[in-house]
Amino acid sequence: MTRKIAIFDTTLRDGEQSPGASMNTEEKLIIARQLIRMNVDVIEAGFPISSPGDFKSVAEIGRIAGDRCTVCGLTRAVDKDIEVAAEALKTAKRPRIHTGLGVSPSHLHDKLHLTEDEAIERAIRAVKLARNFVDDVEFYAEDAGRADQDFLVRIIEAAVKAGATVVNIPDTTGYNLPWHFGQRIRDLRERVDGIEDVTISVHTHNDLGMATALALESVRNGATQIECTINGLGERAGNTSLEEVVMAIRMHGRELDAHTDIVTQELCHASKLVSSITGINVQPNKAIVGANAFAHSSGIHQDGVLKARDTYEIIDPADVGAAGSQIILSARSGHAALRHRMSELGYTFADDEFESIYQAFLEVADKKKEVYDEDLESIVHERERVSKAIWTLDAVQVSCGFPLTPTATLTLADESGEKHTVAAYGTGPVDAAYKAVDEIVKVENDLSEFAIKAITRGIDAMGEVTVRVTAASGEVYTGRGSDNDIIVSSTKAYINALNRLISDQREHTA
């Protein structure tokens, strides 16, 4: 059996320190309920003395947590802080006071103005006072990543002897390289008397982009608790991302001799919930929970994933609560991806038919970042219109603007493939294009309706134009056309309407 690694979530305390991420009590309770559903081991609910809101949040979260997880309140190594935290935690069935002070030369000399011996005395006093109120006390050695290692051994041993049940070794500034930090953890295990009887926790920051690596190296060297946040929220560049360390441990549990009890299927929901409440969006390429975490746009990758998911995905999307693998159709997509998506939409084509569809798809994809289902529907419908067409659009070019006269140069192909080109003026670019069509087709009609709408998303959306023309007989004919270019869409729609009119006239004549 592998070692159990406790997950200490500090989204509601350290995560809230991200600029703009402040949460009220009700919002914290919503997130706390999600953390409980995920089966986190510890929720650091706040810093009770910092504000009445934090005090209330800690008390309310203690009340709803019951015995499902430990609820923790942060303090400085100050008597009043500890007393206030103890009061807030009275509602919790499993309370923990998290107290401590800075231990690096910078913190001791510049911030606290303490000698090493004075810092040890303060640490002992804080832990002992906290133990008067609760049985579970965590001692943090702030900025341990830059502390003198011999002093770190001394102060951690003093905290353990004073009654700490958990010792927290933070790389507060994210300064360390993973192997150096791992060596610190291993050295503490070897040199601190009594440390085998307490939990070794690590709290790593992401200033150099290595928070997850620091945490995992610590686990490899004996740590049994990781302090982390949903989406990696936190001061500056953030904290260790809960979803990343949990899934890394799940994927490499044997190598790390580790497991967690987190319900991983709740990870994506938790990420979206925190993002929604804080207003801090998750970057698309964020590991595990980003929008692109299971998205594939390269044709080579798409072909591989369609044949066997694990060719390019080491995690089953369902394991983290994601909707599934996404095949993103773009100019880089190949035949396999397009055929797969067309099949899902209910379309099947023979090889020769499909090649023309694929070429039409590439024409659209070259103009857009992503091709959506509505684009594919439009491509199919446009192909059907062209296959039945009497006249087809070969080219159209317009020039317009103030003070230019709108002009359209248009080329149509007839049924035999012969091309006809004319130029015409109009009151606007669409009017000029329609007059050019009329010069070639020469069918009496009256344009009675013109409507345009976007059929896909984004600024590069496909536009669909619907026109209705009335023949001399009074019959009304509808035509539709779609393209990224609105002039092209408009011209196609008009030609399609006229094709219907001409076809109907031929049937009546026959």
Image (cartoon, rainbow, N blue to C red):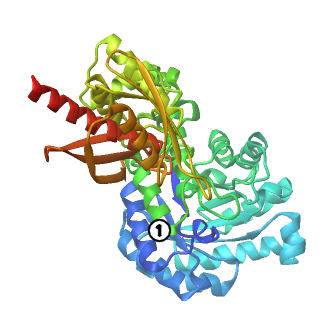
Tag 1 secondary structure: helix
Tell me: residue 345, above or below residue 484.
above
Point 88% across, 78% down: residue: 113
- Residue 399 locus on image (x, y percent): 57, 45
Nearer to the camera, 424 or 17 = 424
- Residue 87 locus on image (x, y percent): 51, 85
Nearer to the camera, 35 or 419 = 419
Q: Quadrant of the N terminus?
A: top left
Q: Quadrant of the C terminus?
A: top left
Q: Quadrant location of residue 124?
A: bottom right
Q: Quadrant location of residue 110?
A: bottom right
- Residue 173 locus on image (x, y percent): 76, 59
Tell me: residue 362, above or below residue 403.
above
Instruction: Report the side of 431 relative to 74 (left or right).
Output: left
Nearer to the camera, 143 or 334 = 334
- Residue 254 locus on image (x, y percent): 52, 30
The residue labelled by disc 1 is 277
Work out whether residue 309 can be spotted: no
Point 38% across, 69% down: residue: 65
Work out whether residue 374 can be spotted: yes
Tell me: residue 100, above or below residue 225.
below
